[in-house]
Every structure is written in C-alpha cells, then in structure tokens.
Amino acid sequence: MMNREDGIALAGSVSRRNFLGAASAGALLLGVSGAVAARAGAQAGGTAHAATVVADPTAIPAPIRRRHSVHHDITLEAKEVRAKLADGTEFGFMTWNGQIPGPMIRVRVGDTVTLNVRSSAGNMRPHCVDVHAVYGSGGGAMATIVPPGGKASMFFKCLYPGAFIYHCAVPNLDEHISRGMFGMMLVEPEEGLAPVEREFYIGQHELYTREPFGTAGLLHFDYAAMVHEQPNFVLFNGMVQGLTAAGVGALRAKVGETVRVFMVNGGPNLSSSFHPIGNVWSRCWPQGALANPPVAYIQTQPVPPGSCFIGEMRLPLAETVKLVDHALSRVARQGLLAEIDVEGAADPGLFHKMA
C-alpha cells in the first residue's frame, strides 16, 4: 500500500512564541571555483533579507505510527539570505527553506521519496543536496545540482534506519555548509520510536568571519580561517545564543516529562562534545544509529561533523538545562548555547541549595 504524504513540517516565521508557547552540471560546478567564488563570497549571500534564520526546534514532523510504506513528495528550496547573527550583527547565510538547520525530513524504512530541489531566483550560487540516507552517487548531489532559479528532482527508497545529515555538496561545500546549508533526515525503523512527551531539533555549525566575535554590522566570510579551522562563531541554529531567553526564545518542557533531542552537526570542520548541563542523556544513539541498542546515562557524546545524534532526557527537576558543546570556549566566547526551561514545583528531596 503506497500513500502520499509530506515528511517535513515547515516552521514559517520564527518568533519567541514558537518556542515558549509549545510546552550542464560539470560547467556549472566549475563556475563556482576560484575567483568567481571569492567575489561571490565577499557579498552577503544574495539580496534577500530575513529577520532571522533560526529554525523553530519544535516545528518537526510528528512521530510515525503507521505500519505500511508511503511515498513522500518533499521540496527543499535553496535560499541565500542576509539575516541577524547577533544583536547589531548580520551575516549572509545560505539555507534550506530559509532556516538553519534545514527542515527535518521524517520518513520510515521502506518509504520512497521524491525530493524536489529548487533554487531561489535571487541566489548567486549553484546548490545541490547530498543525503546520507540515500544509496546513490554523491547521495544525489549530481542529480540535484541547480543554478539560481533552477529546479531538479530525484527519487529514492529508504532502506536503512537512523538519523542522517543532508547538506549542499558543490565544490565549495565547506563554505555552503558553514553558512547554513545542512539539515537532518530521520528514517524511523519499522517499529517506530518509543513515545516521549516532547521532541526538539537543533543544528550545530561554525562560521568563519574576517571580523572577530562581537563586531557590529555586516560580517564577511573568511576562507583562510576556514582552511585553518579557526572560526569566530560556533552556533546552534544560525544565531548567537538564539535558542535562549536572550535570543529568539528558550525551549520549554515540564517536570516529569521525557524529551528527545535530535541534533545534526553540519560542521563543516568541528566535532561537538554534546552535553546537557544539569542533566544526562538517559538514553542515546551515537551518530543517530537507530539499528543499534541505545547507550544509557551518557554525560557527553561526541558528534562528528557530518553526523547526527539522538538523545533522551528525563526531567525530574524544575531547572534550566543548558545544551552545550563541552569544548566550552565555544560557549563562553563564540555564541553556542541553547536552553530548555523545565517548569514545575521544586523537589528538595532530589536537590536543594544548602545554607
């Protein structure tokens, strides 16, 4: 039995309410190398403007409860936009569907997908998609290369479970990923995932800029810093402390709940030491490997660039859980932080401050 459905949930414009209220291909490729790419990179990644590129971490597809395969018709649109990086600071991002990370695609083993890749007419660069959940040359990259204003499609069948990155894969893929062109495709096993009260979806990446952290105005990409793997910013969802009360808004949950966090590390270069301050990963699947048993009570889990993570936390206490990379200078000095505000009554039998 084959039905059609979408495997993504689009976030639309992101506001504080979203978080707080939700308890010829070869010639084309060559054309972006060398001086052409350098000139384009000095500009703001296109002429479109957006208030923010921060993806709403709650705007993800619902868990799959069916026991049959369906066909998904999914569209990803490459959008180059200038948007807020921090208060008083802007950057030229490259995105899928105007958000970082790109929309989470959620399917099941045995499902088929038609993936339509489009490029906004105002873009300056070609783009394509490499999907790590796909058997096929380049993960579909050559099948989906599109110039500004172009479109292409590919068909594939999902044959193995797990959480997998998708990302732009033109020759300057490192720059495109750094600017935000990555997301997650979740392929659920046939039996599905265990129920939890809430799910969140976030993406880590680093930005390489000529200007140092804290500079106001429009920042510019630095290719030399990228080659030497020396970013000025390490971010969740494309904004300095964007997923906090001081940014677009913190995530919300309640005492007694279990939350599941999906994290994709776009990189392009840095590994993450993903850690929940004030909590622990009750169960997690390193590299999103759902075909394997979870590991229990993990404090800090490495997430390499180009990989994913699935972790669950039990929430016995009212507290603020801080999601960080435990390479802590990235938190203290480069903008990486997300928060989960856990609401509920205090329980001094579990924790309290002593005089």
Image (spheres, rainbow, N blue to C red):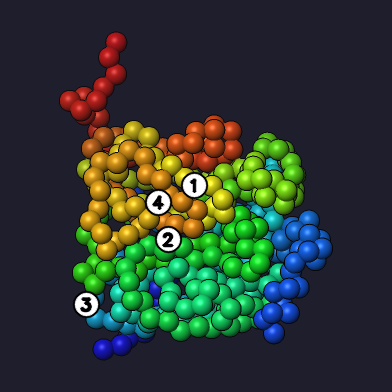
Relative image position of residue 174 (x, y in whole percent): 62, 58
Residue type beneath disc 2: Ala
Gap in angstroms between the C-alphas marked 2 and 4 = 12 Å
Residue type beneath disc 1: Ser
Gap in angstroms between the C-alphas marked 1 and 2 = 25 Å
User: Can you tell which mark lies on residue 271?
Assistant: 1
- Label 2, secondary structure: give it: loop
Relative image position of residue 272 (x, y in whole percent): 47, 45
Callout 4: 10 Å neighbours few (<14), some, many (20+)?
few
Give the labeled residue for mark 4: 21
Q: Quadrant of residue 119?
A: bottom right
User: Left or right of 299: which side holds 90?
Assistant: right
Relative image position of residue 268 (x, y in whole percent): 57, 54
Residue type beneath disc 4: Gly
Gap in angstroms between the C-alphas marked 2 and 3 = 24 Å
Q: Nearer the viewer, mark 3 or mark 1?
A: 1
- Label 1, secondary structure: give it: loop
- Label 3, secondary structure: give it: loop
User: Left or right of 205: which side holds 67?
Assistant: left
User: Left or right of 63: which side holds 105?
Assistant: right
Relative image position of residue 21 (x, y in whole percent): 40, 51
User: Can you tell which mark lies on residue 67?
Assistant: 3
Q: Foreground residue, 53 or 139?
A: 139
